[in-house]
Image: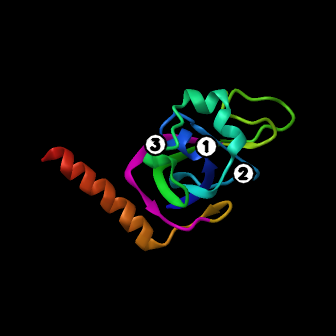
Amino acid sequence: MQAISVQQPWAFAIARGGKTVSNQALPTAYRGPILVHASMRVDLTACDSPLIQAAGWDPRDPLAAIGAIIAVADLDAVCSPTGATCDCGPWATPGMHHWHLASVRTLPRPIVALGRPGLWEPKPSLVTEVTAKFARATLNKVT
């Protein structure tokens, strides 16, 4: 499993608002589950973006946390447009690599963690904690 740090409110939009593209400077060959980490940086100008507002941005929501894992997604594909535009949707920034995220699962509560730029490998203990939170949430729904 890998992880990626994303600034707020973009991380929130992935977790809650249907943002299925993460714009990255570099492509990746990795495909599979990816932890979505809300970085310690906040893109304040993005908070007023119509896309972010439509995604339901609410700084009081627990998924608006910073410095925490807030969701897990599947990195399914990467679009790397060269000169031409692509059909990756409104979340795709021209000139960037578009990492396509699917099956986003939000955590019941954020897990405080240090992130880092780019794609990174989380410590096994962090992956175990994420898995345990999902298991407890599922157990609580059954009982």
How many residues crowd around disc 3 within 10 Å: few (fewer than 14), some, or many (20 or more)? Answer: many
N-terminal label among 1 and 2: 1
Res 32 visible:
yes
How many residues crowd around disc 2 within 10 Å: few (fewer than 14), some, or many (20 or more)? Answer: some
What is the span of residues highlighted in magenta in the rendered image? Answer: 99-115
- Residue position marked by numbered label 1 in the rendering: 10
Q: In this view, does 127 lie above or below 34?
A: below
Report the residue that reaches farthest toward the left.
Answer: 143
115 or 22, which is in the foreground?
115
State the SS at label 1: helix
How many residues crowd around disc 1 within 10 Å: few (fewer than 14), some, or many (20 or more)? Answer: many
- Residue position marked by numbered label 2 in the rendering: 27
Res 89 visible:
no
State the SS at label 2: loop
12 relative position to 84: left or right: left
119 or 32, which is in the foreground?
119
x then y, percent, for residue 70: 47, 52
Residue that appears at 20% across and 45% down: 141
Q: In which quarter of the image is residue 49?
A: top right
Q: Is the magenta stretch mostly helix, strand or loop?
A: strand
N-terminal label among 2 and 3: 2
5 or 60, which is in the foreground?
60
Amino acid type at image mark 1: Trp
Look at the image and say whether residue 34 sits in the magenta stretch. Answer: no
- Residue position marked by numbered label 3 in the rendering: 104
How far apart are the alpha carbons under marks 2 and 3? 20 Å
